[in-house]
Image: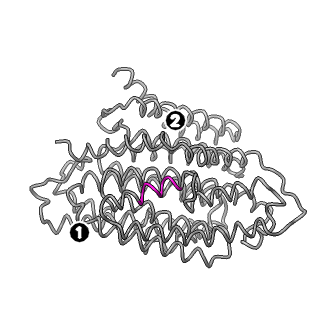
Amino acid sequence: MAIMHIISLALVFAAALLAVFGIASAMAKSRRFALASGMVLLAFAAILSAYLLGSGANYTMLGIVHIYPFSMLFVLLFSVLMMLIEVLSFASKNFAGMQILIGFAFIALLVVPSATSIIEIFIGLELFSVMVTFMIIIEGKSHTEAAVKFFVLSAASIALFSAALALMLPYNGSMLLAPASASLAAGSAMLLLALVFFIAAMSFDTAMFPFNLWVPDVYEGASANVTATIAGIGKKLSFVALIEVLFVFFASSGSIYSPLLALLSVLTMFYGNFAAMVQKRVRRLFAYSSISQAGYIMIGVAVATQYGVEASIVQIIAHAFMIIGAFALIMWLETINIRSIDDYSGLASRSRFAAVSLTIIMLSMAGIPPLLGFDGKLLLFSSAISANMLILAVLGVVNSFLSIYYYGKLISVMFTQKERRRIPLNIGIAAVVVVVLAVVVVLGIYPEPVIHAASMASSSLFSLASSP
């Protein structure tokens, strides 16, 4: 156990050092030092969290960090994803400054999954939101509108979460991540109102309908590397917070929030898919696509079972990699002014790598086997059926078919016409895309490791709700 504590402390120090080295690299104005230190520390954090996950460790450190499979799986995931963001952000003209923000954002990525109290979750979410707002701003004045809209969405979430916290206090005076007092919770209108406020707050953060109206504007207005951070990491962090609080603090209220979340899931899937069908710009197409993906993830949460949460975790992992890979390719192509769907005409003849990679990513998003997106959706729909929510599963399948329309349209444009002008390969972006493809294809064909990890995480989370 002493060794475990040492490893846990090393993980915490790695997160802190990432912020420190970010400041040091900004002062030295050294881009290479910023990238090297960031990649080494994130890789170190990934190795430590993978070890703790594999060991099945379950203990609290310093009273504020809970080391257990749920937290370590997401720290591992976010460490790897942040490494990809580091590479994408290296082309930024203010990468040294970006590194400071990445360092502090990673602290939030450690705090939220490992939180022992709801207050920690609240602080972690807002720390991440503030860092992302500054990430958008430092890329230039042209991104100011996106930063303002993102800030307003975050502020709305803060206000609603704060109201929920005030209403939750009588049921858990310590605000520890533990079930609400059963003696007070039974039939309580105040607790129900707290639940509504909390779900509304997380709906802003996770881009659920109808709280997502500015999300496509933010995705389009921010630089591509920051958009990848928001869609691939920020939204997933919010789902982690939602799952933690719902299935621990509100554990006894599943019969209340399950129908509400099912409705939000269906509305979000249809809204995202129908809106994506009419988009002319590729960024907005993927923005609305990611909104529909949030609806799919919500299916497992709405099911309100351990199996459902396991399915949601698998889909969170799958979509996190897929959307970062998609925006990596978008970032690359935008450097040569390829932005609209029409601009993608003949892309296969200009860059076979870009066209094939984007096709695989979109097929995975659509849920085509044998890719990881298919495994995630299969688990989600199966969990809904096992919980006697057949209509939710059927509507999820219907939406998967709807998404094939706009993904297929873009694929058709890329492969049906020819262009002679070749696109030079960007090594950094190509490396990110190769990692994404490896995850999507290899874990799609052999999903047992990710499913087993998700099962461990889901089981360890539900044990918190049942513990005295």
Q: Which residue is mark 2?
A: 46
Quadrant in the picture for residue 194: bottom left
The CA span between labels 2 and 1 is: 39 Å
In x, y percent, where is residue 260?
A: 31, 70
Which comes before the other along the chain, label 2 or label 1?
2
Q: Is residue 129 visible?
A: no
Compared with residue 90, is residue 343 higher up or lower down, i.e. above or below?
Answer: below
Residue sitting nearer the eye, 197 or 143: 197
Left or right: residue 2 compared with residue 132: left
Residue at the farthest right position: 420
In x, y percent, where is residue 181?
A: 14, 53
In x, y percent, where is residue 34?
A: 65, 39
Q: Which residues are magenta?
A: 374-381
Residue sitting nearer the eye, 186 or 158: 186
Q: Which residue is mark 1?
A: 193
Q: Main secondary structure of the magenta part?
A: helix
For the point 68% across and 45% down, the residue is 434
In x, y percent, where is residue 18?
A: 54, 38
Q: Is residue 200 magenta?
A: no
For the point 34% across and 48% down, the residue is 120
Quadrant in the picture for residue 468: top left
Residue sitting nearer the eye, 388 or 188: 388
Look at the numbered disc 2 and give the secondary structure of its residue: helix
Q: Amino acid at mark 2?
A: Ala
Look at the numbered disc 1 and give the secondary structure of its residue: helix
Q: Residues within 10 Å of mark 1 (few under 14, many from 20)?
A: some
For the point 75% across and 70% down, the residue is 413
Q: Amino acid at mark 1?
A: Leu
Left or right: residue 455 compared with residue 405: left
